[in-house]
Amino acid sequence: MMKKIVIVALMCSAMLCVYSCGKRTASPVGEPYSDYEGVYLELVSVDMAKDNKTMILQWHNDTAYEVRYDYDDEYCIEKKTDNGEWEECDVVMWVEECGDGYYIKPWEESGDIYEYDKYYKVSKKGTYRVGTVCSVYDGAEGPTVAKVWAEFEVK
């Protein structure tokens, strides 16, 4: 009987240590969203390490048109609330101007590394999404603005 109590106590101690010392992890979930068919943002990975909080993002342009992402349109991170609504995460720092951005040629992809912890607090368990807008030069009068986002889960 004493042996069982010791084993249970050790297991509880180990679980407490894992719970209190454990690191948060994050991984992409679901399919990327876009309101413009063929243009989307894929979340490849999320690194939550203390000194390297980054997201690897992959832009996809599966259209015959050129797409432009402006750094001034910066990424936004939102957390899903208990009632299913999306709420912007706490902002660490706003960026006024980030540079020119880049073009994604027709039928090409382009990668981006986003150091999200410089701008948003992402630490609690839950479902999040990273999103932004881009311009699709599809021959319409002026570019068509497309909204894109991808979801991830923090555990």
Image (cartoon, helix red, strand yellow):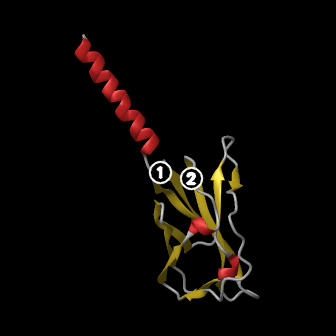
View extreme (right): residue:
141
Location of residue 40 with respect to 3 vertically, above or below:
below
Left or right placement of residue 94 versus residue 116 in this view: right
Q: Earlier in the sequence, mark 1 or mark 2?
A: 1
Q: Quadrant of residue 150?
A: bottom right
The spot of residue 11 in percent (x, y) is 32, 28
Left or right placement of residue 91 versus residue 64 in this view: right
The spot of residue 20 in percent (x, y) is 46, 41
Location of residue 70 with respect to 31 vertically, above or below:
below
Q: Quadrant of residue 17?
A: top left
* Residue 12 visible in the snapshot: yes
- Give the residue type that dot 2 points to: Ser
Q: List the residue tagged with mark 1.
A: 24
Q: List the residue tagged with mark 2.
A: 123
Distance of label 1 from label 2 (alpha carbons): 7 Å
SS class, disc 2: loop
Front residue of 123 and 149? 123
Q: Are marks 1 and 2 in contact (CB under 8 Å)?
A: yes
* Residue 148 visible in the snapshot: no
Left or right placement of residue 21 versus residue 147 in this view: left
- Give the residue type that dot 1 points to: Arg
Front residue of 13 and 43? 13
